[in-house]
Amino acid sequence: MNLKNKTAVVTGAASGIGRALGVRLAQAGCRLALADIDVQGLAETADMILKSGGYASMHPVDMANRDQVYAFADSVNGHHGNIHVLVNNAGVTLTALIEEMEEADFEWVMNINFWGMVHATRAFLQNLKSTGKAHIVNVSSVFGLCGIPTQAAYNSSKFAIRGFTESLNQELRGTGVSASVVFPGGIRTNIARNGRFKSNSGLLKDKSDVIALHEKLSFTSADTAAKRIIKAILKEKKRALIGLDAYLFDIIQRLFPSGYQTLLTFLIAKRDHLLKVK
Ligand SMILES: NC(=O)c1ccc[n+]([C@@H]2O[C@H](COP(=O)([O-])OP(=O)(O)OC[C@H]3O[C@@H](n4cnc5c(N)ncnc54)[C@H](O)[C@@H]3O)[C@@H](O)[C@H]2O)c1
């Protein structure tokens, strides 16, 4: 793939990885269609791109709303014509034990992370195919490789993204469209701050505990993640790991496909001591 004078769609573009990706794709020569539910953050990202000489259209969209996602695709198709890159990046987290969580919170996560990705992929697929050469990136997580306590909803959505993308890739063989599933480790973004917390388990005390833990465990910048995703697009990689921690998760679950659970439970129990959080 070559990104000069191409059009790229990025969801979740108001913050973190999506914002960095929008900026980097514009620098690489793409025209951008940016989507997010956060209109102010979206305008800031678009402004960054316009000020550096790029072009971006802004699309306020709730990725959990099927009709809005299809209307977004119609609007982008009408405005931009052929689409070369689609990045399904919008995502949220929920920290809650399975026993304690509200179903509505579980659905909130699945509707954005999983169904948002499904609807956008299906809504843009005809356009991507008719472009001739195009690429889809679906953002999973290391929690799409390993399960972890309090993240069952997030784990479910991110494992599902992997399954969907691996199936999609095989179905797209010979069409000129390919797809990557990417597995970031800890990335310094607003993901923990934007997440929901519902737990009395004592495993994590409150939302500030989740934010502190995420900050301690995030070794990669959003910009580095964006550069890695662009590399995956250029090389049409079927899968990409982002950050050394992602490689570690990948190796651990390959070597100890069930034993990794014992290891993670041990590390979580010892985390205060190991990480000196609070
Ligand atoms: N930060 C990490 O450590 C990490 C690790 C692995 C995977 N990821 C994944 O990376 C992706 C990007 O997250 P981030 O870390 O940049 O977090 P972030 O919170 O900084 O950005 C996520 C963006 O998604 C948007 N969003 C949330 N709900 C939405 C909705 N209903 N409709 C449209 N947009 C919505 C938010 O407004 C925000 O701009 C997510 O899919 C996340 O699961 C992040």
Image (spheres, rainbow, N blue to C red):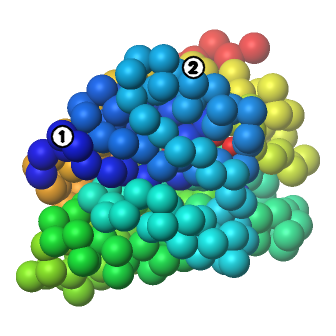
Relative placement, left or right, of 54 versus 147 is left
Q: Measured along the vertical axis of the image, is residue 150 above or below residue 152? A: above
Give the camera-side residue of 207 and 20. Answer: 20
> Does the image show residue 6?
yes
Q: Measured along the vertical axis of the image, is residue 127 above or below residue 31? A: below
Image quarter where ligand 1 lies: top right
> For the point 15% across and 56% down, which residue is it?
236
* Quarter residue 151 falls in: bottom right
Relative placement, left or right, of 47 versus 183 is right
Q: Which residue is mark 2?
A: 216
* SS for callout 1: loop
Q: First in sequence: mark 1 or mark 2?
A: 1
Relative placement, left or right, of 216 versus 254 is right
Question: x and y percent of residue 102 in the render?
Answer: 88, 67
Q: Measured along the vertical axis of the image, is residue 263 above or below residue 21? A: below
Instruction: Quarter of the image for the C terminus: give it.
Output: top right
Q: Which mark is residue 28?
A: none
Q: Which numbered disc, 1 or 2, marks the residue closer to the eye?
A: 1
- The 10 Å Cα crowd at callout 1, few under 14, some 14 to 19, many 20 or more, is few
Q: Amino acid at mark 1?
A: Lys
- Distance Cα–Cα, label 1 vs label 2: 37 Å
> For the point 83% across and 40% down, which residue is it?
202
Q: Amino acid at mark 2?
A: Lys
Q: Which residue is mark 1?
A: 4
> Does the image show residue 112?
no
